[in-house]
Image: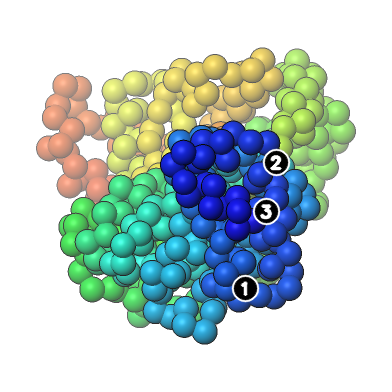
Amino acid sequence: MKLIIDFQGNSATASLVSETPGVRAVIARAWGVYLNDERNVDEPGVADAIQFINRDTQSGHPPNIHEYTEGVGGLDRFAVCVLYHIDRVLRRPHGYPVSNTTVFLLKGLLRLLVESDDGQGPLATALLTSGIIGTITLVLCSFDASTLEGADDVRKRCFNLLTRRFDLSPSYPSLAESFKSNLVHAITTCAQNDLRMDDFLRTLLQRVLPRSLISHTVLSAIDRPVDKDTVLLFPQPDPFRDSELFQLWDRFNKTALRNVRILQAYNKAVSTSVLGCDNMKCEQIRRKNELMRCSSCRAIYYCSTACQALDWYEDGHRDVCSHLRNLRLEFAAEPETLSTRDRSFLHALVHYDYERTLRRSCVDKIGFIRQNPGEQFYLLFDYTRGFERPQVRPVGSPPDPNPSEGSATQWADQIARAARSGGRLNLVVVLVADGEHISRRMVPVRSPTSALHDGLSQIAGRITSGADLAAFTPRIMEDVSSLLRERKERGDHRPVWQRLVVPE
């Protein structure tokens, strides 16, 4: 190995080494043997192997990851060696604080991972299974304030590996693993120091982290005790150098607190899923296990055989049942981005956000009804970059511009059911992002009565045609508040989850 490294360090023979098949396998085999013998990572044998990798990743030739994995004994063994090496580097006798030796022992290996691992495929699977995300986060935390030469390169490679993985589905387990390894500390410390990592921090705080806060898996990783006086989930750090970054951090911190409160209520509650009978002439809302489901499409629920027959023969389910069945099979063939627990929690989150933003969305609905009399609408809850408030959209502008035949049929069926409900069924479409994969989900919100819908229509009807809506806003807000008080007195404000203590 010493001879190979000497040739690699000579400008006259460096290219020969890079282009010779099998050389990397020899180095990788020696590296693996040294690690297997539990040698210290800064001993000559390990250091020589790392010196080769450092030069190889800077040679201008694409690193041959296949030779490295073959030499060390396969993908799984390579992943184990990578994590073992990094762990030994961070925990060597003089590993804290990080030193020039730490940089030397890590930078080439991290470059090799960045250039060889696209986040997908067998190598990515082996690394993820071994716990690479948590380990890379620990490296980032170790270098979060270092000004050593080469520390920037280490940080950049760590952020590259993390953000690449977070942009791929499934992303929630990786984000949870990173949070458990103190990703928050790395973010806040990097933001407080002039480390030229702002682009990575902005990507995380503006796009990646907010969209993950709908996941039960992710929220469980950041869950911590909170009480009614808690105003931020994470302690407020010293001011960031960049005010925009601080605003993004503050928004994330507050949203995380709100959603963790919902998570804790969800976990504590003896919650029972409640659905409404899908015969829109029926007003029954019951526990899910008390309803029967269409045996063909398995998407529609009824409280009785009479309601099922009425919906089949008179309200059109017979025409759409086969399409809904095909849609279910179509979805079953695709990998599910949300776990069963994530999907269940998403319904609770949507219901909470529906109630939290209801006053504002009622005003928006009044504006829509006034401008588009007689036209149906739906609420769009966009969680792909966090969530502020729902958007009121006409049903003629569907959430999926290029739906499959089954999706188009399902959307048309939901519109028809909402129309037949007379205002008791609110169409809610939810956009969620797992990595860069965006999925659309229907989360209808049912109400026992149409009183709120009817009241909003009456308010819209009282506004003079052609008048400036802004001039009526104070009166509209007063009327909406009155409607919502009456709604709460009727108990209509919790139709989806029974005994779920939603935080105020």
Q: Which residue is painted at 77% across and 49% down in the image?
A: 74
- Three-letter code for the amino acid on which mark 3 is drawn: Ala
Identify which residue, 419 or 235, lies in the foreground: 235
Mark 3 = which residue?
28
Image mark for residue 22: 2
Q: Residue furthest bottom?
A: 93
Identify which residue, 262 or 498, lies in the foreground: 262
Q: Which residue is painted at 73% across and 64% down in the image?
A: 33
Characterize the local packing of mark 2: few (<14), some (14-19) or many (20 or more) Cα atoms within 10 angstroms.
Answer: some
Characterize the local packing of mark 1: few (<14), some (14-19) or many (20 or more) Cα atoms within 10 angstroms.
Answer: few
- Secondary structure type for disc 2: loop
- The image position of residue 150, as x and y in percent, is 35, 59
Q: How is the image coloured?
A: rainbow
Circle 2 or circle 1, nearest the eye: 2
Contact (CB < 8 A) between labels 3 and 2? Answer: no
Image mark for residue 268: 1
- Three-letter code for the amino acid on which mark 2 is drawn: Gly
- The image position of residue 207, as x and y in percent, is 39, 46
Among the two numbered marks 2 and 1 on one chain, the one whose residue lies closer to the N terminus: 2
Among the two numbered marks 3 and 2 on one chain, the one whose residue lies closer to the N terminus: 2
- Looking at the image, residue 258 lies above or below residue 386: below
- Secondary structure type for disc 1: helix
Q: Is residue 129 visible?
A: no
- Looking at the image, residue 74 lies above or below residue 192: above
Is residue 335 rendered to the left or right of residue 105? right
Circle 3 or circle 1, nearest the eye: 3
- The image position of residue 486, as x and y in percent, is 41, 55
Q: Using the numbered discs, state the Cα–Cα distance from disc 3 to disc 1 in whole angstroms.
A: 51 Å
